Amino acid sequence: MKRGVAVEERTRRHPDAGSDGRSREQAHISALLVSDSDEQHPLPDTPFTDAGLHLVRARGLAEANTSYGQIRSQLVVLPLTVDGEDSTPFLSRLLAARPAPVVLVIASNDEINVAAEAMRIGAFDCLFRPFSHTRLSKAVEAALQALPAMPEARLPETAWQSTPQSPERRVLPYPAPPAMPGASASLLTVASEMLAVLERADTLARSDVPVFITGEVGSGKSLIARKLHDDSSRRDAPFITVDCAILTPENIGEQCDLLCPTATGGTLFLDEICALDPAVQPQVLHRITAVTERGAIATRPRVISSTSHDPRAAMRAGLLMSDLFYRLHVAPLAIPPLRDRPDDIALIARNKLSEFSLAEGSRVRAISDPAIELLRAYDWPGNVRELLNVIWSAVAMNEGPQILPEHLPREIVSPAERSGQAATGLGPLIGHTLAEIEKAAIEETIRAQGGSIPLAARVLDVAPSTIYRKRESWARRAKSERR
């Protein structure tokens, strides 16, 4: 989130804000930064002071304990290891306080399991070293956006406890994640494979090289594309998304302005490039070549592409021009599927639970351990997008304090039943011709996608024009049969 936007939001939230975007209330918000006693490279002041925060530093856990007891800072930045000591017990005490602060934890790459536990018990975000100034600034801004919505802020303060409380015996505070729809959860991770993707994305953000993102449906390709733009020098220029599934020979002329942001120096994101109609691929290649090779480098668009399919298989099948592929496939970035990141399943589910509970006005505060185990065992063909749908639905339909196995979809709770259904699901199709089966599959998929032919084409892995032609053929045949 850009700082200007966040300041504007805080100004609207506090009508008595001054000209610099800080309100009288904002000016009294403090941030407690905890570090080792001999910290050689402390966190910079500017991400906090630029956000209008009063900055307090504490060296060592003993000093942090004393400082928090005196100041009760609303934001705490806490390394998971301080002077060689595990700081998780101190984190638990912070989160058990009323009102509880928003806590950003800092971890090294060898503390992945500890970081996962910190997020599970209620830490707002985790920054893995080394992280950029931009990453820290965004985490601080997101934490500030969460402060006014925290229910604990309306509760009376309790005495600061100097002894640990068991996180298993308390209700987790919420909201834990930032209120960015979907983005924060999709990029929340403790998996080494996904951390490597984010690290590579940080490196590529500093370049203008074309990036080719691959990953299954719902894995977060568009969020990674947006991260590449937001973390680059082009962040203040337009980010233009072209849904390749809807480009046809009939509308390519109308859409050409999206392919030609030559005067902006922004980012052009070609979403689902393998769904692009082969008939328009030569025109798209021509336009991309034109806008990326003309004019000053500063005004040329940076091109990012994505696909949920195997692009080389698409080339072999004649669905993707090799010239277009090799123009776009310069720096590959592959997103691992959610089923290969079981720790992320629990992390994302628990974090998004807080956001959805707040949005729905729900009493749900936690997910039971048996429900978490079922979520971890499921294969998530829809990846993070499907997980978010499951959690949101469970929150909306649940009136109790936690999500139990019975609140989850049948296919997650009963995988054996799902397998049995799959094995016998061909019964209704027996006795029909292949053409009839094809028509039924296409029409049912269109209905499942809300009547959207482009979305149905993605699911069926065909070009939208193929579905249009088939439907026209069916309509002509039906009209002929009625005569």
Image (cartoon, rainbow, N blue to C red):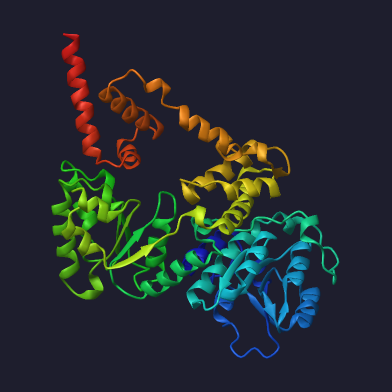
The residue depicted at 37 percent of the width and 64 percent of the height is 333
Q: Is residue 373 left or right of residue 384?
A: right
Q: Vertically, is 108 above or below 430?
A: below
Residue 23 point in image, percent of width and height: 62, 67
Q: Quadrant of residue 277?
A: top left
Residue 385 point in image, percent of width and height: 48, 48
Q: Is residue 179 left or right of residue 163?
A: left
Q: Can residue 363 be seen here?
A: no
Residue 243 point in image, percent of width and height: 30, 49
Counting labels gives 0
Q: Can residue 389 be seen here?
A: yes
Q: Nearer the viewer, residue 458 or 424?
A: 424
Q: Is residue 73 left or right of residue 220?
A: right
The residue depicted at 19 percent of the width and 75 percent of the height is 296
Q: Nearer the viewer, residue 128 or 249?
A: 128
Q: Vertically, is 294 above or below 181?
A: below
The residue depicted at 44 percent of the width and 55 percent of the height is 220
Residue 204 point in image, percent of width and height: 36, 72
Q: Nearer the viewer, residue 218 or 111?
A: 111
The residue depicted at 70 percent of the width and 60 percent of the height is 121
